[in-house]
Structure formats: C-alpha cells, structure tokens
Image: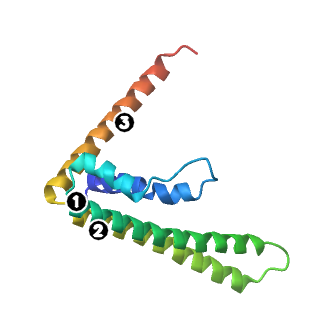
Amino acid sequence: MTVLKSLAISTLTLALAAPALAQQMPQGQGQAPSAEDQVSQLDELVDLDDNQEQELVTLLNDSQSRIQELQAEARELQMQLQGSIGPEFDEATIRQDAERLGQLTGDMMAESVLMQSRLEATLTQEQRDELQRQMEAQQEAMRQMQEQMQRQQQSRPE
C-alpha cells in the first residue's frame, strides 16, 4: 500500500469516525454528523448515484451502530478496570478484563477498516480516483498552510 493510499484511508477513517468520537463527547460539545450528512458530503465530492447514496447510508448506519455497541462495552470494561485498583486486587480478573478490552479495540479497528473497504467497493474507479485527487489537493493545501505558519513564526521577533 502506498503512503498516499494509506494517508487517504486515514483521512477517510477520521471523517467516518467522527460520529463515534462525538458520541464520547459530553452533550452540547459536538454533534455527530448523520450518515445522510456524511453521504451528502461525499456526493458533493464524487457525484454518487441514488443507489450508491442509499447503500452508503445503510453501510454507515450499520457500521456506526456496531462500533457504538463495542465502544459502550469498552467503556464499561474501562470502568471495571479502574474499580479494580487497590490493595485487594484480583490479577486474573484484571488480566481477563484487559484482554477483552484489547479484543474490543481490535474489533472496532476491524469494523472501521471493513467500513472503509465496503465504502470504496461501492464507488466506481472514477469516483475513487476523484476522491483520491481531492484528498491529495486538500493535503497539499494543509502542507502549504503549515509551511506558511512556520515561516510566520520564524520571522517574528522574540
């Protein structure tokens, strides 16, 4: 896998993981974009047809639901592990809970990668190419902005 493809996948992962991250935020600090909103944004980039839009909404809703279930179980295990801290600890239980937490983390990652793969499989080659082109352009703009910020910081008198 090329660095660019890896970066594109990472960028897409962040965009698609936003609902899961927002779910963990306290109320009022962030609202996760709906699957429909995410598909609408993707449609603006690569011009999806109606069948693709519906398939992607279903895909995102299903995947996000599974990820949220895994996150809820992981949070519960984290609280159990925190409750296990103290002089009267049970090492076997702690290790068992920690192992399950690791399994849940792996399952969340697998679900995210599967979601991305299914998303890419829904797009035509032309749409995948356009998405990659747009992500490359966005990355170049970010790189240029970072360089400009660095130049500004270096030119400031201290």
Residue sitting at 30 percent across and 37 percent down? 140
Residue sitting at 47 percent across and 16 percent down? 155
Q: Position of residue 70 (x, y in %)?
A: 53, 73
Tag of residue 118: 2
90 up-or-down from 132: above or below? below
Tag of residue 50: 1
Mark before the other along the chain sequence, 1 or 3: 1
Residue that numbered label 3 is attached to:
142
Number of numbered discs on residues: 3
Quadrant (top left, top right, bottom left, bottom right) of the N terminus: bottom left
Residue type, numbered disc 1: Asp
Q: Nearer the viewer, mark 2 or mark 1?
A: 1
Question: In the visual, does 19 lie left or right of 47?
Answer: right
Q: Secondary structure at mark 3?
A: helix
Residue type, numbered disc 3: Met
Residue type, numbered disc 2: Arg
Q: Position of residue 14 (x, y in %)?
A: 42, 54
Q: Position of residue 11 (x, y in %)?
A: 37, 51
